[in-house]
Image: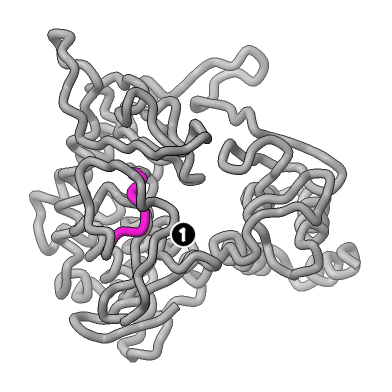
Amino acid sequence: MGTVHKPGRLTFITTGDIEAMWLRDSANQLQSYVSILRPNSSSGSLASLFRGAINLQARYISASPHCNAFQAPKEAGLHIFNRFSSGDSVMPPYDPSIVFECKYELDSLAAFLQLSYDYYSRTHDAEFFARFGWKAAVERLMEVVDELTGGTYADDGMVNDAPYQFTRHTSVATETLANNGLGSPVKGKTGMVRSAFRPSDDSCTYQLFVPANMMLARYLASCAEIMEPMDSHLARKMTTFAGNIRRGIEKYGRVKHPEFGEMYAKENPYYMHGSVINGTGGPHIGPGMAWPMSLIVYIMTSDDDKEIADLLRQLLSSTDKLGLMHESVNVYNPKIWTRGWFSWANGLFGQMLLDLRESISTEERRRWHFTAN
């Protein structure tokens, strides 16, 4: 990551082995440090790193709110390249000198709000948000998500104009959108917001993607607190929108599973298990390749010591002796993996360790050390 200072401090955070900044990844990479974040006006502080990332994400969203990954800012003086999306056809169009890839992912917009609230909740630095482009970015974000609550069809059966389209020449179905870039048909007036792609950068078959809607509702409501002193009308709009999403999820996002009962839609068919690692994956890499991140989240949501110890052993056995978390690992062969430097997964691993440290006593730490060895 690198920093530049004017106009406003900017922090460009690469996703690791790709020199581009994903909104979601960078927000989550910094979330690893939230527990040690403190108010600090120094330009060399952790707080300044957060401020720079928020400033840069706000700039990106104001310019291209439908996009998920961005080039380094011009102030960095880095070489601009794009080997992934040069042949993509996207509407609305974007500036390739700013945008690295333009897959519309609702969780990317929610991640900007999450990052903002992470900083605010630890520093209460309300003045920062009023100084640069944060409010303008939130206004643009609200315009986009409001537009994307609409459905494919109007009340009279006519096909609505699409607010976003994406096509890519590829042999992988989940790397593009069906129906010439429109995606699968979507019901409107549910209160929920469409998402063309999900956090794995794979296209959504069902665009009313429940987890991203949950995340957006949570952080719209939280960030309304930041917005209130600047624009009470917009703050109320954010709160109202969050409530509409929640009601939509409760009405349309619940299903009754024949074995497990009521649950949020839908179960993940990409859970896989083997002799090395057991976890969820996805179509981004395919069957047989589990994501270590899924095990990390499993640890962070478990209170079973034996279960946590077993998951830690699986993670440690999955690195192919590189000492880093990978994007995915073959469940039977740890030498088959993707992404040698995937910062989000490594940041989440660190966050999990800090979370464990906070949740266990000194005596339990001694026992964990003995058990792990």
User: Amino acid type of disc 1?
Assistant: Asp
The answer to which of 23 and 112 lies nearer the viewer is 23
Report x, y in % for residue 328: 67, 50
Label 1 element class: helix
The picture places residue 69, in percent across and down from the top left corner, at 37, 57
Number of other residues with Cα within 10 Å of mark 1, as a class: few under 14, some 14 to 19, many 20 or more: many
Q: Quick check: 204 above or below 17?
A: above
Q: Nearer the viewer, residue 266 or 343?
A: 343
Which residue: 54% across, 25% down? 263
Image-based side of 301 in relation to 372, left or right: left
Say if the magenta span includes residue 293. no
- Percent across and percent down for residue 186 are 31, 21
Any part of residue 59 in sight:
yes
The image quadrant of residue 372 is: bottom right
What residue is shown with label 1? Answer: 25
Quarter of the figure with the C terminus: bottom right
Quadrant hosting residue 154: top left
Q: Residue at x 25, y 32 (%)?
A: 244
Residue 110 visible in image: no
- Which residues are drawn in magenta? 99-104
| Residue 101 falls inside the magenta stretch | yes
